[in-house]
Amino acid sequence: MTSIRDSSNISKEDATATVKGWVQDIRNLGGISFITLRDRHGTIQITMPKKKIDPELFESLTKLSRESVVAVTGEVKESNQTALGIELIPTSFELYSEAGVPLPLGVVDKVNAEMDTRLNNRFMDLRKPETKAVFEIRSTIVELISEYMVKNGFVNINTPKIVASGAEGGATLFSVDYFGKPAYLAQSPQLYKQMLMSTGLDRVFELGPAFRAEHSNTNRHVTEFISFDGEMAWIDKEEDVMATIENIIDHVLRELGERCKKHLEILGKEIMVPKRPYPILTYTECLAMVNENGLKLKEGDDLGTEGEKIIGDIMAEKGSDLYFIVEYPEEAKPFYIMEKDGTDLSFSFDLDYKGQEISSGGQREHRYQELVKRMEKKGLDPKDFDSYLDAFRYGMPPHGGWGIGLDRLVTKILDLPNVREAILFPRDISRLSP
């Protein structure tokens, strides 16, 4: 065997096997020594009775530095002293790579390291079973999202990440020099997925990077993140989009508990599946809730981190971790969101999870003239969006969509304290490496 996971396939005593991995720990008790060898799937014990194995082999193995990479060949013995129920008595080994001393970060040591130390040595941090488990779970979440979307007729797309204009406005755009021309890193695939609604590809989704030049150094903000975006045509109302999101999240949470039992156990987490339908609050109701709890906001103000937390605490007391917030003022939403006729409200929504926004979406403005008016109202020049507007000039069906921050979704599902815990190599205002 080459994987510790495969050890369960060994049923007879004295089978010979080879295991490969990292030397997690060495205990030298004089007459007998033990090595804990680790790979992605777990650990196995290498047992070395000094009088029963080659002296040179014993000496070489016991002098290995922790986290060295080796292949150990030996006899498999049954053991009631190990978690796997077996141990390996070595007959030979090969050293692939010797680890330097001291380690920049402990793997199994019970000493907490600062976030910066962990991220500076992310390659070592990811050797920790609990850190690795987060990304095994994240991978399954992506798999479950894609599974649901394809099954329900959505086409998986990829859109440009170097663009000529931003979807959300100029304040949070990263500028790049594109062969002497001004360009930007994409804030979202918003304009492209809407353009596709005019093509007959009437249901699309994308899981891809997005960039926001937000000068925020909080536990929920990063400058590069993975966005799960969807767009669907032929809708009648924004609730059609909300129902789709609810179905997706429900599918992910229900299946995750079954498919990731081992990794959830490592983290000591249990997946709770909220009751459906998810509660729907209006923006005005939320304003009243935060004001009653001491946060003074007026109509049109952003609920912000503090406001979202207050609402999250109130909803948690009512047994609701997931809930929609609707009827935002149109002034607070981007130009592509449809206004409610005769009001100052919009056909938009946010989905909050445990007191934090994880998704925004709504019904889009599909009527060309109204869309141009929305742009002008927002102080935008329609000429800067010619290629986008062309898709609306020649027949655009009613449509709507959403964007969900994958990193935030993982963070909230697993109750991680910082969104950086859910990102392999996070980028923020102070971090550009590794």
Image (cartoon, rainbow, N blue to C red):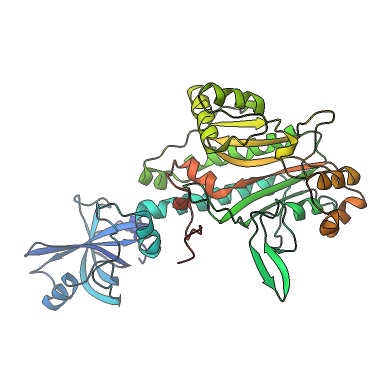
Number of marks drawn: 0
Measured from the top left, where is residue 278 in percent x and y?
A: 61, 28
Residue found at the very far right of the displayed protein: 394
Position of 138 with respect to 339 (left or right) is left
**Residue 6 seen in render:** no
| Residue at x-position 48% and y-position 40% | 257
Q: Quadrant of the N terminus?
A: bottom left
The one nearer the camera, 366 or 99, is 366
**Residue 72 seen in render:** yes
Residue 351 sits in quarter: top right
Position of 30 with respect to 403 (left or right) is left
| Residue at x-position 67% and y-position 47% | 149
Measured from the top left, where is residue 383 in percent x and y?
A: 86, 58
The one nearer the camera, 388 or 372, is 372
Residue 192 sits in quarter: bottom right
Q: In the image, is residue 211 above or below residue 350? A: below
| Residue at x-position 37% and y-position 54% | 115
Q: In the image, is residue 158 above or below residue 257? A: below
